[in-house]
Protein backbone atom coordinates (compact mmCIF):
# COMPACT_ATOMS: atom_id res chain seq x y z
CA UNK A 1 0.00 0.00 0.00
CA UNK A 2 1.73 3.20 -1.16
CA UNK A 3 1.69 6.53 0.66
CA UNK A 4 0.30 9.88 -0.49
CA UNK A 5 0.05 13.43 0.84
CA UNK A 6 -2.10 16.55 1.01
CA UNK A 7 -1.07 20.20 0.99
CA UNK A 8 -4.20 22.34 1.30
CA UNK A 9 -3.45 26.08 1.27
CA UNK A 10 -5.77 29.09 1.44
CA UNK A 11 -5.30 32.81 2.26
CA UNK A 12 -6.47 33.93 5.68
CA UNK A 13 -8.87 36.65 6.73
CA UNK A 14 -6.45 39.12 8.26
CA UNK A 15 -8.85 40.35 10.96
CA UNK A 16 -9.29 36.82 12.41
CA UNK A 17 -5.73 35.52 12.62
CA UNK A 18 -5.41 35.93 16.40
CA UNK A 19 -8.66 33.99 16.85
CA UNK A 20 -7.38 31.20 14.59
CA UNK A 21 -4.12 30.93 16.54
CA UNK A 22 -6.10 30.51 19.74
CA UNK A 23 -8.26 27.80 18.19
CA UNK A 24 -5.27 25.89 16.83
CA UNK A 25 -3.45 26.13 20.17
CA UNK A 26 -6.49 24.55 21.86
CA UNK A 27 -5.81 21.36 19.85
CA UNK A 28 -2.43 20.81 21.53
CA UNK A 29 -1.18 19.12 24.70
CA UNK A 30 2.17 20.95 24.47
CA UNK A 31 3.14 23.92 22.30
CA UNK A 32 2.65 22.78 18.72
CA UNK A 33 2.11 19.14 19.74
CA UNK A 34 -1.38 17.89 18.86
CA UNK A 35 -3.62 16.02 21.25
CA UNK A 36 -4.42 12.93 19.13
CA UNK A 37 -7.98 12.93 20.46
CA UNK A 38 -8.64 16.66 20.34
CA UNK A 39 -12.33 17.31 19.52
CA UNK A 40 -11.63 19.60 16.55
CA UNK A 41 -9.60 17.23 14.34
CA UNK A 42 -9.12 13.92 16.21
CA UNK A 43 -6.01 12.79 14.31
CA UNK A 44 -5.70 9.61 16.38
CA UNK A 45 -8.91 8.24 14.87
CA UNK A 46 -7.39 8.11 11.38
CA UNK A 47 -5.81 4.67 11.11
CA UNK A 48 -3.89 5.52 7.92
CA UNK A 49 -2.51 8.92 8.94
CA UNK A 50 1.24 9.10 9.66
CA UNK A 51 1.81 12.84 10.16
CA UNK A 52 -0.30 15.99 9.95
CA UNK A 53 0.15 19.67 10.68
CA UNK A 54 -1.43 23.10 10.46
CA UNK A 55 1.00 25.91 9.61
CA UNK A 56 0.42 29.62 9.08
CA UNK A 57 2.81 30.70 6.32
CA UNK A 58 4.11 34.00 7.62
CA UNK A 59 7.22 35.09 5.72
CA UNK A 60 9.73 37.09 7.79
CA UNK A 61 11.98 37.78 4.79
CA UNK A 62 9.77 39.74 2.39
CA UNK A 63 12.22 42.66 2.34
CA UNK A 64 15.06 40.45 1.03
CA UNK A 65 14.09 40.89 -2.61
CA UNK A 66 14.57 44.65 -2.25
CA UNK A 67 17.84 44.29 -0.32
CA UNK A 68 19.28 41.79 -2.79
CA UNK A 69 17.90 43.02 -6.13
CA UNK A 70 16.45 46.48 -5.55
CA UNK A 71 12.99 45.21 -6.51
CA UNK A 72 9.86 46.31 -4.65
CA UNK A 73 8.79 44.20 -1.68
CA UNK A 74 6.11 41.71 -2.68
CA UNK A 75 3.12 41.53 -0.40
CA UNK A 76 1.48 38.15 0.11
CA UNK A 77 -1.52 37.30 2.27
CA UNK A 78 -0.91 35.02 5.22
CA UNK A 79 -1.76 31.46 4.21
CA UNK A 80 -3.09 28.60 6.29
CA UNK A 81 -1.77 25.21 5.22
CA UNK A 82 -3.03 21.78 6.23
CA UNK A 83 -0.48 19.06 5.48
CA UNK A 84 -0.91 15.30 5.85
CA UNK A 85 1.04 12.12 5.01
CA UNK A 86 -1.02 8.94 4.87
CA UNK A 87 -1.49 5.46 3.42
CA UNK A 88 -3.62 5.01 0.34
CA UNK A 89 -4.83 7.68 -2.08
CA UNK A 90 -5.76 11.31 -1.52
CA UNK A 91 -9.39 10.98 -2.62
CA UNK A 92 -10.12 8.36 0.02
CA UNK A 93 -8.34 10.37 2.70
CA UNK A 94 -10.22 13.58 1.89
CA UNK A 95 -13.48 11.65 2.12
CA UNK A 96 -12.48 10.23 5.50
CA UNK A 97 -11.53 13.71 6.71
CA UNK A 98 -14.96 15.00 5.79
CA UNK A 99 -16.64 12.04 7.49
CA UNK A 100 -14.72 12.17 10.76
CA UNK A 101 -13.83 15.84 11.18
CA UNK A 102 -16.10 17.94 8.96
CA UNK A 103 -17.28 20.21 11.77
CA UNK A 104 -13.81 20.90 13.12
CA UNK A 105 -12.19 21.38 9.72
CA UNK A 106 -15.00 23.68 8.59
CA UNK A 107 -14.47 25.69 11.74
CA UNK A 108 -10.75 26.02 10.99
CA UNK A 109 -11.18 26.75 7.28
CA UNK A 110 -13.84 29.38 8.08
CA UNK A 111 -10.86 31.66 8.86
CA UNK A 112 -9.85 31.40 5.18
CA UNK A 113 -10.98 33.71 2.41
CA UNK A 114 -13.75 32.27 0.27
CA UNK A 115 -14.82 29.44 2.61
CA UNK A 116 -18.54 29.28 3.38
CA UNK A 117 -20.23 27.14 6.07
CA UNK A 118 -22.21 25.23 3.46
CA UNK A 119 -19.17 24.46 1.28
CA UNK A 120 -18.55 20.91 0.14
CA UNK A 121 -15.46 20.24 2.28
CA UNK A 122 -13.99 17.57 0.00
CA UNK A 123 -14.29 19.73 -3.11
CA UNK A 124 -13.00 22.82 -1.30
CA UNK A 125 -9.88 21.01 -0.10
CA UNK A 126 -9.25 19.55 -3.54
CA UNK A 127 -9.65 22.97 -5.14
CA UNK A 128 -7.13 24.49 -2.71
CA UNK A 129 -4.57 21.72 -2.95
CA UNK A 130 -1.01 22.45 -4.09
CA UNK A 131 0.65 19.32 -5.44
CA UNK A 132 4.20 18.59 -4.35
CA UNK A 133 6.96 19.25 -6.84
CA UNK A 134 8.93 16.56 -5.00
CA UNK A 135 7.73 14.17 -2.30
CA UNK A 136 9.84 11.73 -0.30
CA UNK A 137 8.73 8.72 1.75
CA UNK A 138 11.28 6.95 3.95
CA UNK A 139 9.96 3.46 3.19
CA UNK A 140 7.32 3.21 0.50
CA UNK A 141 4.66 0.69 1.50
CA UNK A 142 5.22 0.79 5.27
CA UNK A 143 1.76 1.55 6.63
CA UNK A 144 0.66 2.92 10.00
CA UNK A 145 -0.89 -0.46 10.77
CA UNK A 146 2.34 -2.25 9.93
CA UNK A 147 4.38 0.14 12.09
CA UNK A 148 2.14 -0.43 15.09
CA UNK A 149 2.03 -4.19 14.64
CA UNK A 150 5.81 -4.40 14.23
CA UNK A 151 6.39 -2.40 17.40
CA UNK A 152 3.90 -4.46 19.39
CA UNK A 153 5.65 -7.64 18.19
CA UNK A 154 9.07 -6.30 19.19
CA UNK A 155 7.87 -5.36 22.67
CA UNK A 156 6.17 -8.73 23.18
CA UNK A 157 9.29 -10.64 22.12
CA UNK A 158 11.60 -8.59 24.31
CA UNK A 159 9.35 -9.02 27.33
CA UNK A 160 9.10 -12.76 26.70
CA UNK A 161 12.89 -13.06 26.47
CA UNK A 162 13.37 -11.09 29.69
CA UNK A 163 10.84 -13.17 31.62
CA UNK A 164 12.28 -16.44 30.36
CA UNK A 165 15.98 -15.61 30.24
CA UNK A 166 16.97 -18.89 31.93
CA UNK A 167 15.07 -20.95 29.36
CA UNK A 168 16.83 -19.30 26.43
CA UNK A 169 20.30 -19.08 27.99
CA UNK A 170 21.63 -22.43 26.73
CA UNK A 171 19.79 -22.57 23.40
CA UNK A 172 21.42 -22.04 20.01
CA UNK A 173 20.09 -19.42 17.62
CA UNK A 174 17.97 -21.89 15.63
CA UNK A 175 16.25 -23.20 18.74
CA UNK A 176 15.73 -19.70 20.14
CA UNK A 177 14.00 -18.65 16.94
CA UNK A 178 11.86 -21.79 16.94
CA UNK A 179 10.71 -21.08 20.50
CA UNK A 180 10.06 -17.42 19.75
CA UNK A 181 8.09 -18.32 16.68
CA UNK A 182 5.99 -20.76 18.68
CA UNK A 183 5.39 -18.01 21.24
CA UNK A 184 4.23 -15.62 18.51
CA UNK A 185 1.87 -18.19 17.02
CA UNK A 186 0.34 -18.80 20.45
CA UNK A 187 -0.06 -15.04 21.02
CA UNK A 188 -1.66 -14.63 17.61
CA UNK A 189 -4.13 -17.42 18.38
CA UNK A 190 -4.97 -15.75 21.69
CA UNK A 191 -5.48 -12.43 19.92
CA UNK A 192 -2.70 -10.64 21.82
CA UNK A 193 -0.52 -10.21 18.72
CA UNK A 194 -1.75 -9.32 15.25
CA UNK A 195 0.39 -9.65 12.12
CA UNK A 196 -1.77 -8.61 9.19
CA UNK A 197 -1.18 -9.61 5.60
CA UNK A 198 0.22 -6.91 3.31
CA UNK A 199 -2.50 -5.04 1.43
CA UNK A 200 -2.60 -5.42 -2.34
CA UNK A 201 -0.86 -2.63 -4.21
CA UNK A 202 -3.48 -0.68 -6.25
CA UNK A 203 -3.14 -1.44 -9.95
CA UNK A 204 -3.58 2.23 -10.91
CA UNK A 205 -0.63 3.20 -8.67
CA UNK A 206 1.53 0.46 -10.20
CA UNK A 207 0.70 1.64 -13.71
CA UNK A 208 1.44 5.29 -12.88
CA UNK A 209 4.73 4.24 -11.31
CA UNK A 210 5.81 2.27 -14.38
CA UNK A 211 4.81 5.09 -16.73
CA UNK A 212 6.78 7.58 -14.63
CA UNK A 213 9.76 5.21 -14.28
CA UNK A 214 10.05 4.89 -18.06
CA UNK A 215 8.63 8.25 -19.12
CA UNK A 216 11.15 10.52 -17.39
CA UNK A 217 14.26 8.89 -18.92
CA UNK A 218 12.59 8.85 -22.35
CA UNK A 219 11.75 12.54 -21.98
CA UNK A 220 15.35 13.33 -21.00
CA UNK A 221 16.59 11.30 -23.96
CA UNK A 222 14.34 13.23 -26.32
CA UNK A 223 15.47 16.54 -24.83
CA UNK A 224 19.15 15.59 -24.77
CA UNK A 225 20.13 17.41 -28.02
CA UNK A 226 18.47 20.62 -26.81
CA UNK A 227 19.98 20.32 -23.32
CA UNK A 228 23.48 19.75 -24.71
CA UNK A 229 23.19 22.79 -26.96
CA UNK A 230 21.85 24.91 -24.11
CA UNK A 231 24.47 23.77 -21.57
CA UNK A 232 27.16 26.39 -22.37
CA UNK A 233 24.59 29.19 -22.17
CA UNK A 234 23.20 27.71 -18.94
CA UNK A 235 26.68 27.67 -17.37
CA UNK A 236 27.26 31.29 -18.42
CA UNK A 237 23.90 32.41 -16.99
CA UNK A 238 24.44 30.43 -13.80
CA UNK A 239 27.97 31.70 -13.10
CA UNK A 240 26.98 35.31 -13.82
CA UNK A 241 24.22 35.06 -11.24
CA UNK A 242 26.27 33.18 -8.68
CA UNK A 243 28.90 35.93 -8.78
CA UNK A 244 26.36 38.72 -8.33
CA UNK A 245 23.58 37.27 -6.13
CA UNK A 246 23.62 38.64 -2.61
CA UNK A 247 23.57 36.31 0.39
CA UNK A 248 21.52 37.49 3.37
CA UNK A 249 22.28 35.40 6.43
CA UNK A 250 22.20 37.51 9.59
CA UNK A 251 21.74 35.83 12.94
CA UNK A 252 18.00 35.10 13.35
CA UNK A 253 16.01 37.26 15.73
CA UNK A 254 16.32 35.77 19.26
CA UNK A 255 12.54 35.94 19.74
CA UNK A 256 12.00 34.00 16.52
CA UNK A 257 14.54 31.36 17.58
CA UNK A 258 12.96 31.08 21.03
CA UNK A 259 9.49 30.60 19.52
CA UNK A 260 10.80 27.83 17.26
CA UNK A 261 12.72 26.12 20.07
CA UNK A 262 9.56 25.99 22.15
CA UNK A 263 8.03 23.65 19.54
CA UNK A 264 10.93 21.19 19.30
CA UNK A 265 12.30 18.09 21.02
CA UNK A 266 9.17 16.84 22.80
CA UNK A 267 9.80 13.55 21.02
CA UNK A 268 12.61 11.82 19.16
CA UNK A 269 10.93 13.00 15.94
CA UNK A 270 10.46 16.69 15.09
CA UNK A 271 8.66 18.74 12.48
CA UNK A 272 10.33 21.23 10.16
CA UNK A 273 8.67 23.87 7.96
CA UNK A 274 10.52 26.51 5.93
CA UNK A 275 9.47 28.94 3.22
CA UNK A 276 11.39 31.30 0.98
CA UNK A 277 11.12 33.37 -2.18
CA UNK A 278 12.69 32.14 -5.41
CA UNK A 279 15.26 34.44 -6.99
CA UNK A 280 13.64 36.70 -9.58
CA UNK A 281 13.61 35.80 -13.26
CA UNK A 282 12.63 32.81 -15.33
CA UNK A 283 16.12 31.33 -15.24
CA UNK A 284 15.97 30.44 -11.54
CA UNK A 285 12.33 29.37 -11.67
CA UNK A 286 12.82 27.02 -14.60
CA UNK A 287 16.09 25.69 -13.19
CA UNK A 288 14.46 24.91 -9.85
CA UNK A 289 11.40 23.34 -11.51
CA UNK A 290 13.60 21.09 -13.64
CA UNK A 291 15.84 20.07 -10.73
CA UNK A 292 12.89 19.25 -8.46
CA UNK A 293 11.41 17.20 -11.31
CA UNK A 294 14.62 15.15 -11.37
CA UNK A 295 14.79 14.88 -7.56
CA UNK A 296 11.20 13.68 -7.53
CA UNK A 297 12.17 10.87 -9.91
CA UNK A 298 14.90 9.68 -7.55
CA UNK A 299 12.54 9.94 -4.57
CA UNK A 300 9.91 7.83 -6.33
CA UNK A 301 12.17 5.13 -7.76
CA UNK A 302 15.58 5.12 -6.06
CA UNK A 303 15.35 6.49 -2.51
CA UNK A 304 12.42 4.34 -1.40
CA UNK A 305 14.05 2.14 1.25
CA UNK A 306 15.12 4.17 4.26
CA UNK A 307 17.32 7.00 3.04
CA UNK A 308 17.36 10.19 0.99
CA UNK A 309 20.83 10.34 -0.53
CA UNK A 310 22.77 9.27 2.60
CA UNK A 311 20.36 10.83 5.10
CA UNK A 312 18.29 8.19 6.91
CA UNK A 313 16.51 10.25 9.59
CA UNK A 314 13.65 11.67 7.47
CA UNK A 315 10.22 10.01 7.62
CA UNK A 316 8.39 12.18 5.06
CA UNK A 317 9.36 15.37 3.20
CA UNK A 318 8.17 17.48 0.29
CA UNK A 319 8.84 20.63 -1.69
CA UNK A 320 5.78 22.62 -2.81
CA UNK A 321 5.56 25.73 -5.01
CA UNK A 322 3.09 28.42 -3.98
CA UNK A 323 2.10 31.89 -5.23
CA UNK A 324 2.62 31.16 -8.90
CA UNK A 325 6.02 29.54 -8.32
CA UNK A 326 7.35 32.70 -6.70
CA UNK A 327 7.85 30.93 -3.36
CA UNK A 328 8.75 27.42 -2.24
CA UNK A 329 7.75 25.58 0.93
CA UNK A 330 9.73 22.64 2.30
CA UNK A 331 8.32 20.50 5.11
CA UNK A 332 9.70 17.36 6.73
CA UNK A 333 9.38 15.04 9.71
CA UNK A 334 12.82 14.03 10.98
CA UNK A 335 14.57 12.36 13.92
CA UNK A 336 16.91 14.07 16.35
CA UNK A 337 17.65 17.72 17.07
CA UNK A 338 17.55 20.43 14.44
CA UNK A 339 21.32 20.92 14.68
CA UNK A 340 21.98 17.22 14.04
CA UNK A 341 19.45 17.27 11.18
CA UNK A 342 21.13 20.20 9.46
CA UNK A 343 24.61 18.79 10.02
CA UNK A 344 23.48 15.44 8.63
CA UNK A 345 22.48 17.16 5.41
CA UNK A 346 25.55 19.39 5.28
CA UNK A 347 27.94 16.46 5.69
CA UNK A 348 26.11 13.85 3.63
CA UNK A 349 24.10 15.73 1.01
CA UNK A 350 25.28 19.33 1.01
CA UNK A 351 25.39 19.31 -2.79
CA UNK A 352 21.70 18.38 -2.83
CA UNK A 353 20.82 21.26 -0.54
CA UNK A 354 22.69 23.63 -2.82
CA UNK A 355 21.08 22.17 -5.93
CA UNK A 356 17.61 23.19 -4.71
CA UNK A 357 17.90 25.93 -2.10
CA UNK A 358 20.56 28.01 -3.91
CA UNK A 359 17.74 29.14 -6.21
CA UNK A 360 16.17 30.92 -3.25
CA UNK A 361 16.82 34.52 -2.24
CA UNK A 362 19.42 35.01 0.54
CA UNK A 363 21.01 31.53 0.35
CA UNK A 364 24.79 31.39 0.99
CA UNK A 365 26.82 31.78 -2.21
CA UNK A 366 27.30 28.63 -4.30
CA UNK A 367 29.77 27.78 -7.04
CA UNK A 368 28.71 25.68 -10.02
CA UNK A 369 25.32 25.13 -8.37
CA UNK A 370 26.50 22.37 -6.00
CA UNK A 371 29.71 23.65 -4.38
CA UNK A 372 30.16 25.89 -1.30
CA UNK A 373 26.71 27.10 -0.15
CA UNK A 374 25.73 24.84 2.73
CA UNK A 375 29.41 24.15 3.45
CA UNK A 376 29.46 27.64 4.94
CA UNK A 377 27.82 26.03 7.95
CA UNK A 378 27.07 29.04 10.13
CA UNK A 379 25.57 31.12 7.33
CA UNK A 380 23.56 28.13 6.14
CA UNK A 381 22.12 27.48 9.59
CA UNK A 382 21.29 31.15 10.08
CA UNK A 383 19.60 31.28 6.69
CA UNK A 384 17.55 28.17 7.29
CA UNK A 385 16.52 29.15 10.82
CA UNK A 386 15.52 32.60 9.61
CA UNK A 387 13.19 31.08 7.00
CA UNK A 388 11.78 28.46 9.37
CA UNK A 389 8.11 28.70 10.33
CA UNK A 390 6.36 27.98 13.60
CA UNK A 391 4.10 24.96 13.19
CA UNK A 392 0.87 25.61 15.05
CA UNK A 393 -0.32 21.97 15.27
CA UNK A 394 1.69 18.82 14.57
CA UNK A 395 0.59 15.18 14.87
CA UNK A 396 2.79 12.07 14.82
CA UNK A 397 1.03 8.69 14.70
CA UNK A 398 4.02 6.77 16.08
CA UNK A 399 5.73 8.90 18.77
CA UNK A 400 8.90 7.53 20.31
CA UNK A 401 9.81 5.58 17.17
CA UNK A 402 12.64 6.80 14.99
CA UNK A 403 13.17 5.76 11.37
CA UNK A 404 15.90 3.44 12.71
CA UNK A 405 13.39 1.87 15.13
CA UNK A 406 10.91 1.29 12.31
CA UNK A 407 13.53 -0.47 10.21
CA UNK A 408 14.70 -2.59 13.17
CA UNK A 409 11.13 -3.59 14.02
CA UNK A 410 10.47 -4.56 10.40
CA UNK A 411 13.58 -6.76 10.39
CA UNK A 412 12.45 -8.42 13.63
CA UNK A 413 9.11 -9.26 12.06
CA UNK A 414 10.80 -10.49 8.90
CA UNK A 415 12.88 -12.87 11.02
CA UNK A 416 9.73 -14.35 12.54
CA UNK A 417 7.88 -14.75 9.25
CA UNK A 418 10.68 -15.94 6.94
CA UNK A 419 12.68 -19.19 7.06
CA UNK A 420 15.58 -18.33 4.77
CA UNK A 421 18.17 -17.09 7.27
CA UNK A 422 21.55 -18.76 7.78
CA UNK A 423 22.95 -19.37 11.25
CA UNK A 424 24.94 -16.14 11.02
CA UNK A 425 21.80 -14.36 9.86
CA UNK A 426 19.84 -15.72 12.82
CA UNK A 427 22.50 -14.45 15.24
CA UNK A 428 22.31 -11.02 13.67
CA UNK A 429 18.53 -11.14 13.90
CA UNK A 430 18.61 -12.10 17.58
CA UNK A 431 20.95 -9.17 18.26
CA UNK A 432 18.09 -6.86 17.21
CA UNK A 433 16.17 -8.11 20.24
Image (cartoon, rainbow, N blue to C red):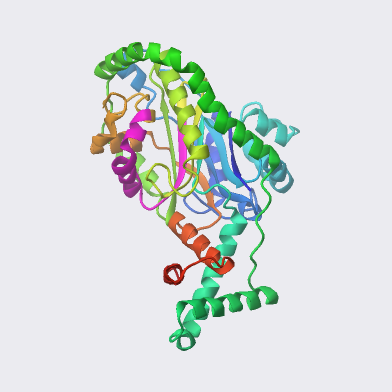
- Residue nearest the observer in this picture, 300 or 250: 300
Using the image, determine if residue 307 lies above or below residue 419.
Answer: above
Residue 182, picture quadrant: bottom right
- Relative horizontal placement of residue 192, taking residue 300 as reference (left or right): right
Residue at 64 percent across and 39 percent down: it is: 206
Using the image, determine if residue 386 lies above or below residue 33.
Answer: above
Using the image, determine if residue 242 lies above or below residue 301.
Answer: above
Res. 118 visible in picture: yes
Percent of width and height locating residue 64:
34, 22
- Quadrant where the C terminus sits is bottom left
Res. 131 visible in picture: no
Residue at 40 percent across and 18 percent down: it is: 284
Residue 422 forms part of the magenta stretch: no
Residue 364, picture quadrant: top left
Percent of width and height locating residue 32:
48, 48
Percent of width and height locating residue 210:
60, 35
Residue at 46 percent across and 23 percent down: it is: 290
* Range of residues picked out in magenta: 329-355
- Residue nearest the observer in this picture, 229 or 348: 229
Percent of width and height locating residue 118:
76, 33
Secondary structure of the magenta portion, mostly? helix
Residue 349 forms part of the magenta stretch: yes
- Relative horizontal placement of residue 240, taking residue 71 as reference (left or right): left
Amino acid sequence: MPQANLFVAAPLKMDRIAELRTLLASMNVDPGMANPQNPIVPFGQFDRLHFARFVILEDQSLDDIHAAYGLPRREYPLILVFIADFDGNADDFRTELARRAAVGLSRIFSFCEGFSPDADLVRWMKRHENHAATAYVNWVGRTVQRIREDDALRRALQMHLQKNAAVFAEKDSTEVRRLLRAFVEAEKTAGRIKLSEEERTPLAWQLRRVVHLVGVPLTLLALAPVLVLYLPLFIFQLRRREKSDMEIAPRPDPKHEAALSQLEDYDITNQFSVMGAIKPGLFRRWTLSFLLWLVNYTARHIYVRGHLARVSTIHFARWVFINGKNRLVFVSNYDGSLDSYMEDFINKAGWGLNLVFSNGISYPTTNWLVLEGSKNEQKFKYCLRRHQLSTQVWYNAHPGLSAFDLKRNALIREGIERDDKTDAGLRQWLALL
